[in-house]
Image (spheres, grey):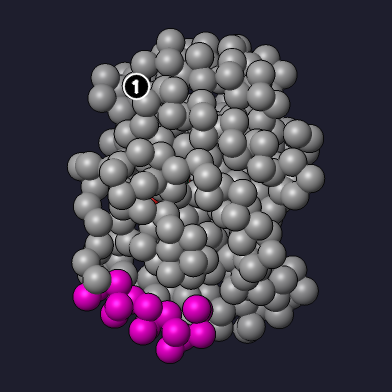
Amino acid sequence: MESSKIRGLVAATVTPMKENGEINLSVIGKYVDYLLNVQGVRIVFVNGTTAEGLSLTTEERKQLAEEWVKQAVGKLDQVIVHVGSLCLKEAQELAAHAAEIKAGAISVVAPSFLKPPNKDALISFLREVAAAAPSVPFYYYHIPKLTGITTIRMEDLLVGIKSKIPTFQGVKFSDTDLLDFGQCVHKYESEKFTFLYGVDEQLLGALAMGAHGAIGSTYNYIGKTTNDMLAAFKSKDFEKARKIQCLMQEFFSYVISHGFMVGETKAIMSVASNIPMGPPRLPLQETSNEYLTQIIVLMKSLGLL
Ligand SMILES: CC(=O)N[C@@H]([C@@H](O)[C@H](O)[C@H](O)CO)[C@@H](O)CC(=O)C(=O)O
């Protein structure tokens, strides 16, 4: 698959599972068609947070990456495979595999149990993983709320990074710190890095700070509405863009205060796409029918479904 610069929306995919907890590769073809034809989303992020990547076996991750790449051919623009792991060797194995199957890009989250003690240790880890896929564009996956690595700012991480990781292409920035985000875009403009924002509820703020695109769980099912917001922003209709973001925020505000994790994402996506995404894997929990009904009623009333 072509690896070109990433622009626009990227769906952080869920991993379809059967009721017995096995991964369900058979629906990925339909999933691709749904993203493309209904949501207008042409890039996917596979085996990330929403995909429960770190709860899958290495073999499952490889099978999923292969199936996504296979189904994307001739349809999607790009498949980004998340290859991060607590284990360097496993991350390298997954990176080499992503290169072998011709994934468009790889992304790596910081190991979060035995954590890198400082920026240099983190870069050393990332460099070793990136080296296992020496011709595949590399994106660092910054999600401090989940990794617990809260003291390494991206603005600092990027200093001289291209000399350490030649395939470095950009950051998937899943944090609310728009000061750090804005400085990354501003200071590294000449490097032509790509900055993809990952907090869907405030994407408009990041667009104003120069985001090139966005990766998120909700682009699976409100990609079309978010694309309308991107179009309004691009044509400088800021009033319209703000209205769309605020409308989506009514949904975010409700679900975030009542509980919003992968179980909810999978359930909403199953209803929206009519493709069974199944339950999440333990320790995550399936959402209740009662709560799902409330979410769907709200989304319909907002015109998001
Ligand atoms: C913590 C979390 O799951 N964040 C999501 C967001 O899309 C998030 O679901 C959304 O902003 C709602 O809070 C993404 O950043 C995660 C993501 O891109 C991924 O699944 O790899």
Q: Dot 1, how many residues are within 10 Å of its Cα: few (below 14), some (14-19), or many (20+)?
A: some
Please name the amino acid that badge 1 sits on: Leu
State the residue position of label 1: 86
Quadrant assignment, res 172: top right
- What percent of the width, then of the height, locates residue 183? 57, 45
In the image, is 264 to the left or to the right of 109? left
In-front residue for pair 9/197:
9
Q: Is residue 88 magenta?
A: no
Q: Is residue 3 above or below residue 27?
A: above
- What percent of the width, then of the height, locates residue 34? 61, 61
Q: Is residue 293 magenta?
A: yes
Label 1 element class = loop
Magenta-colored segment: predominant secondary structure: helix
- What percent of the width, then of the height, locates residue 233? 69, 71
In-front residue for pair 147/218:
218
In-front residue for pair 126/104:
104
Please state the extent of the stretch shown in magenta in the rendering: 290-305
In the image, is 30 to the left or to the right of 175? right
One can see residue 222 in this view: yes
